[in-house]
Image: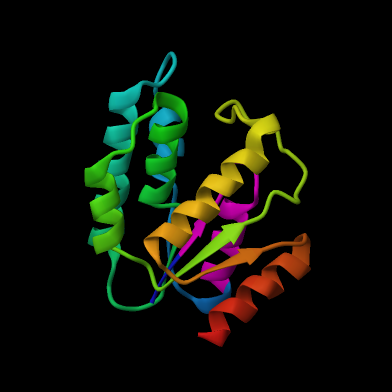
Amino acid sequence: MRIVLTGPESTGKTTMAEQLSIWYKGRMIPEFAREYLTNREGTYNIQDVYNISARQLQISKNEYRGSLQIEDTDLLTCYIWLEDKFGIRDKQIWSSLEQWRPDLYLLCATDLPWQKDPLREDQWRRNIIAQKYFKNLERLKVRFCVVEGSGRQRFNKARFFIESM
């Protein structure tokens, strides 16, 4: 089973992915964008987003072993990023999303406090971006659940959705 944590910045995706992978003893796939952008000087550009999307997909596919895999984001973030920042609706990324669908998306709500981070930039637009995730998940026609709350409550909701499958 593949489970992808998704949603706007600073919504607890990484923490939740780590917690769930420990709880279920599954493989955790980190967000490649963080590694890529941390090692890059200056601002990112369109090609950077394409590089990130290609590597994120490659890692996801290469690491999948048929057992539980929990991913801290996937191509949906790159698709939304390209659309939001550069006005591009990339058909190839969308096609890859349709072909490499997880069993479940956990869409992390914006109800957590903003955590400052040098790679984050949309503190005041999280709700707008959350709507983009919601609409695109509906458009993909995939199974997804919205995870809300904080701390143990958020973790328990994620577990409930996973175990309901």
Q: How many marks?
A: 0
Q: Residue at x 36, y 21 (%)?
A: 45
The reply, left or right, for residue 157 in relation to residue 30 is right
Q: Residue at x 45, y 73 (%)?
A: 26
Q: Residue at x 47, y 32 (%)?
A: 84
Q: Residue at x 59, y 77 (%)?
A: 161
Q: Quick check: 152 above or below 162?
A: above
The reply, left or right, for residue 96 in relation to residue 121 is left
Which percent across, then down, holds residue 67? Answer: 35, 78
Residue 3 lies in the magenta-colored region: no
Q: Nearer the viewer, residue 137 or 63?
A: 137
Inspect this view and state whether residue 71 appears.
Answer: no
Residue 17 lies in the magenta-colored region: yes
The reply, left or right, for residue 88 in relation to residue 18 is left
Which percent across, then down, holds residue 145? Answer: 58, 68
Quadrant assignment for the N terminus: bottom left
Q: Quick check: 111 above or below 143?
A: above
Which percent across, then down, holds residue 10? Answer: 64, 43
Q: Which residues are magenta?
A: 4-22
Inspect this view and state whether residue 141 appears.
Answer: yes
Q: To which quarter of the image does residue 97 belong?
A: bottom left
Q: Residue pushed farthest bottom?
A: 164
Q: Residue pushed farthest top?
A: 42
Q: To which quarter of the image does residue 51 belong?
A: top left
Which percent across, then down, holds residue 76? Answer: 40, 49
Q: Quick check: 100 above or below 26?
A: above
Q: Quick check: 124 above or below 63?
A: above
